[in-house]
Amino acid sequence: MRVVWIAGIAAVVVTASTPSQALDKVRFGTNWVAEAEHGGFYQALADGTYKRYGLDVTIVPGGPNVNNRILLPVGKLDFFMSANSLQSFDAVAQNIPTVAVAASFQKDPQVFVAHPGVTKFEDLKTRTLFVSKEGMTTYFQWLKSDFGFNESKVRPYTFNAQPFLADKNSAMQGYVTSEPFAIERQGGFKPVVFLLADHGFDAYSTLIETRRNLVEKKPDLVQRFVDASAIGWYHYIYGDSRPGNELIKKQNPEMTDALLSYSIAKMKEYGIVDSGDSVKLGIGAMTDAHWKSFFDKMVRAGVVKGGLDYKRAYTLQFVNQSVGIDLRPK
């Protein structure tokens, strides 16, 4: 994830300070610097949940110049936090021996933010749209196929909010947990927010990926990491998030309490972590139907080839067991 107004972030590896003799060592790589969107994992580390599940976890942060994803298949990480379902499809297409074992986010946090006065999602088609290069090859192709968006309206998004702020007839991509926060402070107004997931872009996000050989040889280890992470998310979203937040700030000194609080509130408000299938099946839930729905949309949009054996991208072996569901407030 990217926050447009944060720069020069230091990355520090955080590990559990517990005796390791009786614990299984696990290295978990994230895809960005520490932030609330990783909070469940930091919470599970900070409050001892991983330890209670027999795990000595090291969180290895990502960042603008760090590509942790390539470390997973070569064995330098045991688990990796994948951005969304498209990365899982890409692993199958490239014959990379990794597999998604849980979806921490039921909804992808991708949004468009617009100036006040925009009332309908379809109104964005008439606006200048600031979209990143990656966005053009992924979700924007879906916007074209399902909503008739036109590339002639697109301008490059460089993770700088100023072009959007200067043009009241524009909209800008972002994450629901960060860019609206930055716009409110930089622009002095509350932007209109459209979560793509609420309009049909049903990718899973913040998935836990691991190697296929780990699933085959150490399924108990995988199960414990998935279960402990889910409990961490329940504690972070619904309980006292301060332990997780303190670790996040230790690893990312540029992080603020205000942004952490905002991000947690938005994850709850929009059902990013806990909604849909996870309400009954537990945080981390995945279903065949959900994967197929997104795959079909990406094929229709020309993002993924129709002949891809997409079911190799994931396994339901470790989820949908309602682990931690009793921790959700009644």
Image: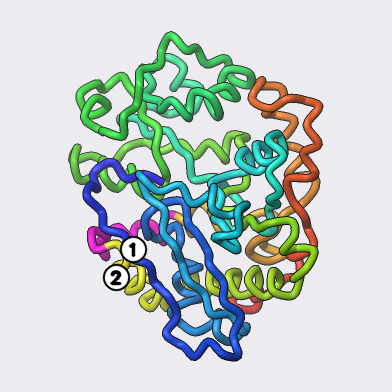
Residue that carries the numbered disc 1 in the rendered image: 261
Q: Nearer the viewer, residue 165 or 79?
A: 79
Magenta run includes residue 257 = yes
Magenta run includes residue 106 = no
Q: Residue at x 78, y 25 (%)?
A: 306
Residue that carries the numbered disc 2 in the rendered image: 250
Of helix, strand and loop, which one carries label 1? helix
| Amino acid of disc 2 | Lys
Q: Residues within 10 Å of mark 2 (few under 14, many from 20)?
A: some
Magenta segment boundaries in residue numbering: 253-266
The answer to whether residue 183 is seen in the rendering is yes
Q: Characterize the magenta stretch by its predominant secondary structure.
A: helix
Of helix, strand and loop, which one carries label 2? helix
Q: Position of residue 197 (x, y in %)?
A: 57, 40
Q: Residue at x 52, y 74 (%)?
A: 57
Q: Nearer the viewer, residue 289 or 251?
A: 251
